[in-house]
Image (cartoon, grey):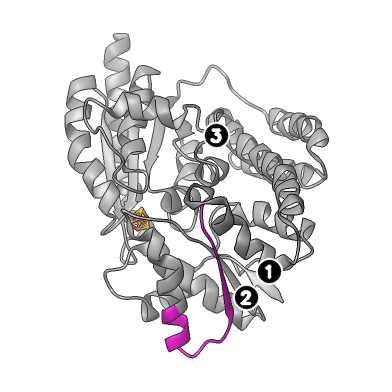
């Protein structure tokens, strides 16, 4: 059995580590590319959301490279994500691909639905799977914390590209983690690699929060590497969701910085219930960033994404009430980096002039 999953940020690191501990052979599909998207768009329904199209492209490329088993997260509404695994399976079968599909439902749908498919695939007991999860999850959190640190520090680099280079080296440091007791030490060492980058702490940076649909935020191919682009233009960044926040959303210490209940409380005056995906979080995190003195918010989501369309209809009122500028980007397969860059440049100019006006310059 050779298992593959869709690509989404560094979710492959968590999954690869977990499956290795369970003795399952795992392959990472090729990096998402224009070809991946073209393959997915060819087979997926036109109005399906972009993540589904990229997932299908990833799966086709994994099957072409020898994978015979595909692993996919399940879920339940109200957004379409809960149907992804079944829809993807049918689309690929109709296109003539043969494979086994393992669907792992979130623990909130019942522990047996979560553990059952992993037990079946690995032949391991629930106790062994939980033990493996307890080892893999803190390691994945370390990757998230390192990523967060990079987002906060790239804006001060003196030599363009030096933080990205250091980040890759720091990720290599984290790959040495074998047990939970090693997480803290290796994370400290990885952060010290980023700290060695020559920085100018006196630089006048903009502070921006990035909110929106999880896949677009977590997968650099889908967001046109917007974080690196912004960081290299002197923007200090925070992101509302990280891989381990998404996988373990009930976590008490999310890497994103505020717990789901705190975010829901902040969103309450505007949206009092979950609407699927990260719709509620997008509203709550905007208020969170405004309270923390951020200069602006970037909202990114796929075309036809229902939860984020709801958030987008609410956010203009939030922006007016709490005086925080928000720019929205709807992404589909027609979106190009140049268009995003042009609008983003104008947004950065606006934020900087507002900041200078506040400072009386
Ligand atoms: S959150 Fe939006 S883009 Fe993501 S699966 Fe749901 S509807 Fe699609």
Q: Which residue is mark 2?
A: 69
Compared with residue 255, is residue 217 higher up or lower down, i.e. above or below?
below
Q: Are marks 2 and 1 in contact (CB under 8 Å)?
A: yes
Tell me where residue 293 appears, x and y as whole percent: 38, 18
Indicate which disc, 3 or 1, sits on the residue closer to the N terminus.
1
Q: Going 60% across and 35% down the picture, which residue do you hit?
A: 150
Indicate which disc, 2 or 3, sits on the residue closer to the N terminus.
2
**Occupied quadrant, residue 254:** top right
Q: Name the element at disc 1.
A: helix
Q: Which residues are magenta?
A: 90-106
Q: Going 32% across and 42% down the picture, which residue do you hit?
A: 299
Question: 197 and 8: which one is in front?
Answer: 8
Question: 28 and 118: which one is in front?
Answer: 118
Q: Name the element at disc 2.
A: strand
Q: CA distance from mark 3 to mark 1?
A: 26 Å
Q: Is residue 23 magenta?
A: no
Q: Which residue is mark 3?
A: 251
The crowd level at tag 3 (other Cα within 10 Å; few <14, some 14-19, many 20+) is some
The crowd level at tag 1 (other Cα within 10 Å; few <14, some 14-19, many 20+) is some
């Amino acid at each position: 059995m050779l298992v593959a999953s869709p690509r989404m940020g560094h979710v492959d690191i968590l999954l690869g580590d977990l499956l290795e501990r369970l003795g399952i052979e795992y392959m990472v599909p090729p990096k998402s590319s224009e070809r991946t998207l073209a393959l997915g768009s060819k087979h997926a329904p036109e109005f399906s959301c972009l993540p589904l199209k990229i997932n299908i492209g990833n799966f086709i490329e994994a099957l072409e490279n020898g994978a015979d088993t595909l692993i996919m997260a399940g879920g339940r509404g109200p957004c379409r994500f809960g149907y992804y695994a079944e829809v993807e399976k049918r689309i690929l079968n109709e296109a003539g691909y043969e494979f086994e599909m393992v669907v792992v439902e979130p623990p909130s749908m019942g522990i047996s639905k979560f553990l059952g498919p992993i037990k079946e695939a690995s032949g391991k007991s629930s106790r062994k799977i939980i033990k493996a999860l307890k080892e893999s999850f803190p390691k994945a959190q370390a990757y998230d914390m390192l990523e967060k640190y990079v987002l906060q520090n790239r804006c001060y680099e003196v030599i363009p590209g030096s933080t990205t280079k250091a980040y890759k080296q720091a990720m290599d440091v984290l790959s040495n983690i074998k047990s939970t007791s090693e997480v803290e030490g290796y994370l400290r060492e990885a952060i010290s690699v980023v700290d060695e980058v020559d920085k100018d702490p006196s630089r006048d940076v903009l502070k921006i929060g990035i909110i929106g649909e999880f896949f677009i935020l977590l997968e650099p191919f889908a967001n046109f590497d917007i974080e690196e682009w912004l960081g290299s233009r002197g923007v200090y960044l925070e992101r509302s969701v990280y891989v381990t926040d998404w996988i373990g959303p009930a976590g008490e210490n999310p890497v994103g910085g505020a717990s789901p209940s705190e975010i829901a409380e902040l969103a309450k005056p505007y949206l009092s219930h979950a609407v699927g995906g990260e719709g509620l979080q997008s509203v709550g995190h905007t208020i969170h960033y405004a309270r923390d003195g951020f200069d602006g918010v970037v909202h990114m989501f796929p075309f036809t994404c229902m939860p984020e369309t709801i958030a987008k209809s609410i956010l203009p009122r939030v922006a007016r009430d709490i005086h925080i500028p928000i720019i929205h980007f709807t992404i589909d397969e027609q979106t190009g980096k140049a268009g995003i860059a042009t609008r983003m440049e104008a947004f950065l100019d606006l934020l900087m002039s507002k900041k200078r006006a506040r400072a009386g310059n």
